[in-house]
Amino acid sequence: MARLLPFLSAYRYTLLSAGLVVVLILPPVLRSVDRSWEPFPAVLLSGGGSVVSTHRDSVDTQVLRAYGYRSKDTVLVPIPPDSLLHPVPGRYLSYLFHRGALGPTDDPAARRERRDWLAPRLNRLGLKDTRMLLRSESLRMPDRGRDTVVATVVSEWWLELD
Amino acid sequence: MRIATGLFFLLVYLPYFGWLADLPRLFFSPPPLSVAALFTGYPGPAFFLVLEGLMAVAAAALTLGWRARWAGLVLAFTLIIGLSFQFSLGKIDHFSLLPISLVVLSFSDWGSGACLRPDRRLGLGALPLSVTAICLSFGMLTAGYYKLRGWVDGDLGTSGVLNWYYTSFHGDMGLLPKGWLLGIGPVWLEAMDLATVVFELLPILMLWLGDRAWRGWIAVACLFHFGTTLLLGIDFLYHVPVYLPFVLAGLQQPGLRRITAGAVTAVATLSAHHLLLSWWGRPAVYFMVPDQLLPGAVREWGIALIWLVLAGLAAWTAVTVSSPKVLKP
């Protein structure tokens, strides 16, 4: 220990730099190997290198939307994700879906727990609490900026809550 | 610097995690390399009450300089724990620079002046600030690298900024009239893509060039966040305490010698305000106002204003201040 301290003191900036390099480099390396290995916390900021078309007649993007049956007339209506998931931020909807949180499960207790959490939220929005639809849609704006949106269904999944 | 950071948490933004306690276990999908991965589900309400209690007390202790080093570390680790559970919803939002900078700055001597109970001086000088600057630059580099690969394609038929716009709910979250961005021509959209990538790749170079260039970049960064708040509703509020030390380091600061009884009372009241509201289930995450009473647009305009003021201060220090280089060890 007596020999180690002078060494640490003499090379403190070299050691700090080496430690910093490891701490900084490791997380992006792990993320590039497998996105799910991204550690938290880590010195990483959102990349998001995706692009969309700028052409006025072909701007499109893919989104996940939730739908429920309106209680009064059983019409299928879109559910705002922030209202459905409150207090979970609505931006998490697609991540929850892709991680299987809104998919089938063999665990009846977990299914019941999910139903008990979602049902009051659907009721508050004037929707039936028996089932809801999760639909992946391709949104196309033929007249960009004019609120005209043409939605094409890519895939859909019924979540049975009963 | 320390007082401003503490006050930021008490006055502007104190995260709340109590809502996680009620979530179904099917929603629990923690990042494998995180604190939350040590758990099998979301902890109960008592766990988060303790976490919030620690955050409110630590923010007050940091502001008043009562064992500021420990207060900063407690604040950082409670944030890391709380955020680990929040990101167990399946997505890591990139808030890491906030707790990391708190950890690093806790090793500065920011807790040895104008304090209720001063910390022992470590004498590391500007090193913690330099490490924070390196972390910030590297974080920006990781963001810029992915955009460089995707956005800089010389193709006027594609746009990364437009993609941001669509993924932020088609501008619904922004403060400017919806559709504002859509009127911009492809050349300008491509220029915005390029400018964003340059902005994110540049800080390492600015840091190397010296103090004035670095402060200039900080000013541009604050303006960038002001722009994303207006345009997309992406406010990056959690980056404010990361930039704050660089903005304040060059300014003439009030010569505080001691903490007065009035200041202790005011800070303790603020801390108690947060504690009581959290325990009541009506947290005041933004601007000390319970979330239910604060309209989203008012909150975002407030945040936009903070970025604008910081941009102005940073630009002022970049132009007028001559101080030691940030990277000086």
Image: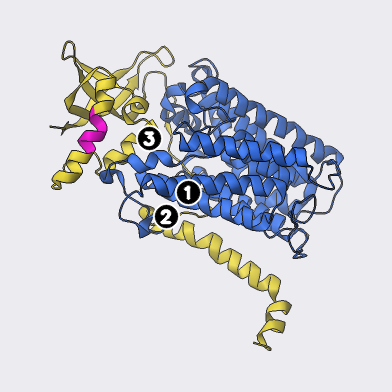
Chain colours: A yellow, B blue
User: Disc 3 versus disc 1: distance between alpha carbons?
Assistant: 21 Å
Q: Amino acid at mark 2?
A: Glu
User: Disc 1 versus disc 2: distance between alpha carbons?
Assistant: 28 Å
Identify the mark at residue B58; answer none if there is no mark: none
Please determine if labels 2 and 3 lie on a single subunit.
yes
Closer to viewer: mark 3 or mark 1? 1
Q: Residues within 10 Å of mark 2 (few under 14, many from 20)?
A: many
**2 and 3 marks in contact (CB < 8 Å):** no
Identify the mark at residue B50; answer none if there is no mark: 1
* Residue A142, x across and y down, in percent: 35, 16
Q: Amino acid at mark 3?
A: Val
User: Disc 2 versus disc 3: distance between alpha carbons?
Assistant: 22 Å
Closer to viewer: mark 1 or mark 2? 1
Name the residue at 31% across, 47% down: B28
Name the residue at 65% across, 68% down: A16
In front of the other: B232 or B185:
B232
Closer to viewer: mark 2 or mark 3? 3
Q: Which residue is mark 3?
A: A88
Q: Is residue B145 above or below residue A114?
A: below
Please determine if labels 1 and 2 lie on a single subunit.
no
The quadrant in which residue B199 appears is top right
Q: Is residue B44 magenta?
A: no
Q: Is residue B258 above or below residue B123?
A: above
Asked which secondary structure carries label 2, the reply is loop
Q: Which residues are magenta?
A: A114-119
For residue A124, say whether it is visible: yes
Q: Which residue is mark 2?
A: A38
* Residue B82, x across and y down, in percent: 46, 48
Indicate the chain on which mark 2 is placed.
A
